[in-house]
Image (tube, coloured by chain):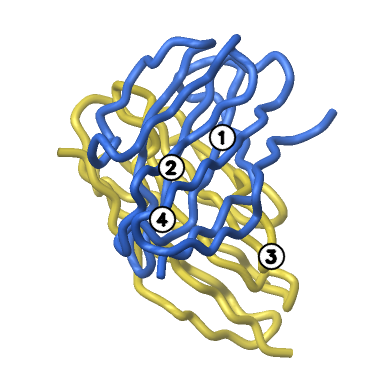
Chain colours: A yellow, B blue
Amino acid sequence: GNSVTQMEGPVTLSEEAFLTINCTYTATGYPSLFWYVQYPGEGLQLLLKATKADDKGSNKGFEATYRKETTSFHLEKGSVQVSDSAVYFCALTDSNYQLIWGAGTKLIIKP
Amino acid sequence: EAGVTQFPSHSVIEKGQTVTLRCDPISGHDNLYWYRRVMGKEIKFLLHFVKESKQDESGMPNNRFLAERTGGTYSTLKVQPAELEDSGVYFCASSPRQGAYEQYFGPGTRLTVT
């Protein structure tokens, strides 16, 4: 069945460091891929998405590229800020339009 | 435009009691989804409404869970009777269409069954 695997956290970085959170998926067909973020005390927000192979989603300095050959959708940011501290979820939509989620990665940015 | 709202934000009940969670989607969104995250595990799909009809309820764990969406507006999720393993965060989301369109999430309801 469809599944999403993302790196376990927490990930702790210093401000201005480079961030990568790995995400790989298993899916039949051609899923759409998403990164959602949950800031402390808030709900889930869509961070970025990609709907077909080689698409690059980007938002707030974050980027992720849909790589069909490696079934990956890694999240990157060149210089993180304390305000980026949150839990990040990788997800895909299956043929029934359900979101299939990774376990979430907690990101802690220290000043 | 108001976002997705959920009520209550937190509920603590005893095993065997009944709890009803409510979700108000964004106005005009026909699609409404329920998900839950049990402690330490992935967020899991529960069910999907299109207007007032259940499009997909394959994720509902058992018949102790009952979801309704009367009139195609707000939705309720009732757990009766609640068990300890039902504890977790219940998220509701809505979207204007199916597919690759963004699902807008509410803040979640944290359910604790003691």
Tags 2 and 4 touching, CB below 8 Å: yes
Residue annotated with mark 2: B35
Q: Is residue B113 at least partly visible in the picture?
A: yes
Residues at marks 3 and 4, CA–CA distance in whole angstroms: 15 Å
In front: A38, or B80? B80
The chain letter for the residue carrying disc 1 is B
Residues at marks 2 and 1, CA–CA distance in whole angstroms: 8 Å
Give the residue drawn at x 35%, y 73%.
A8
The local secondary structure at tag 2 comes to: strand
Residue annotated with mark 1: B93
**Labels 1, 3: one chain:** no
Q: Position of residue A21 (x, y in %)?
A: 44, 66
The chain letter for the residue carrying disc 2 is B
Type of residue at label 1? Ala
Tags 1 and 3 touching, CB below 8 Å: no
Residue annotated with mark 3: A41
Q: Is residue A62 left or right of residue A50?
A: right
User: What's the mark number on residue A87?
Assistant: none
Give the residue drawn at x 49%, y 49%.
B90
The local secondary structure at tag 3 comes to: loop
Type of residue at label 4? Arg
User: What's the mark number on residue B37?
Assistant: 4
Residues at marks 1 and 3, CA–CA distance in whole angstroms: 17 Å
**Upstream in sequence: badge 4 or badge 1:** 4
